[in-house]
Image (cartoon, rainbow, N blue to C red):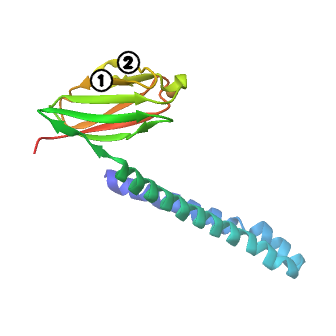
Amino acid sequence: MKIPSLKSKKWLLSGLLTTSLLLSPHPAKAQISEADTSEFHQIEQPIGLKLAVAVAGLGLIGLELWWFLFSQTKAQSATASEGIQSVDITVDGGYTPDQIVVQAGQPVKLNFLRKDPSSCLEQIILPDFNKAINLPLNQTATVEILPPKAGNYTFHCGMNMFRGTITAEKHT
Ligand SMILES: [Cu+2]
């Protein structure tokens, strides 16, 4: 019984929408009868607006797609040596790389090299591992973590303005 009621709600909504769309040009139509020359003017504007909205929508979709593809290429896998994985992360106006792929259940050394003097990036916080570390300027600070299972773990600056993700994958 739930599904039909949901469908009827949708029908009701689309019905209301259609009605409001049909009703909205009425004030414009009233004006058209007074002056025929204004007809094109009155109709052109909504079409231009619709086109603008459509173009803006497409632009947003394109931007999202670009962002998705772009951020995918930025992901970097940790290099493993004698059972310990390590990643060098440069801290300069954010984190590079900000997406790190590691193996779950194995220790990971995150070597943060902070080049940015802003206090914003002074602290690095790894909430999932209960770690908050101060990063000295122009020095490498190593943070060791052990992602217990596959999943995403985040790290961020002291004010949570810059973020990065550690993706732990299952053993293969
Ligand atoms: Cu910050």
User: In the image, what residue type sits under mark 2?
Assistant: Ile
**Callout 1: few (<14), some (14-19), or many (20+) C-alpha neighbours within 10 Å?**
some
Give residue 82's quadrant in the image.
top left
Query: Residue 65: x percent and y percent?
Result: 43, 59
- Pick the residue in front: 51 or 89: 89
Location of mark 2 (residue): 133
Per the model, the C-alpha gap separating discs 2 and 1 is 8 Å
Query: Residue 14: x percent and y percent?
Result: 52, 62
Secondary structure at badge 2 equals strand
- Pick the residue in front: 1 or 126: 126
Give residue 99's quadrant in the image.
top left
Location of mark 1 (residue): 143
Left or right position of 54 against 89: right
Left or right position of 9 against 77: right
Q: Earlier in the sequence, mark 2 or mark 1?
A: 2
- Pick the residue in front: 109 or 19: 109
Query: Residue 145: x percent and y percent?
Result: 24, 25
Residue 89, placed above or below residue 118: below
Secondary structure at badge 1 equals strand
Q: Quadrant of the C terminus?
A: top left
Query: Residue 164: x percent and y percent?
Result: 38, 36
Give residue 22's quadrant in the image.
bottom right
**Callout 2: few (<14), some (14-19), or many (20+) C-alpha neighbours within 10 Å?**
some
Determine if the C-beta at disc 1 is less than 8 A from ligand 1. Answer: no
Q: How many marks?
A: 2
Residue 105, placed above or below residue 35: above
Left or right position of 111 against 27: left
The reply to whether dot 2 and dot 1 touch (C-beta < 8 Å) is: yes
User: In the image, what residue type sits under mark 1?
Assistant: Val
| Farthest residue, direction bottom | 36
At 53% from the left edge and 58% from the top edge, which residue is drawn?
60
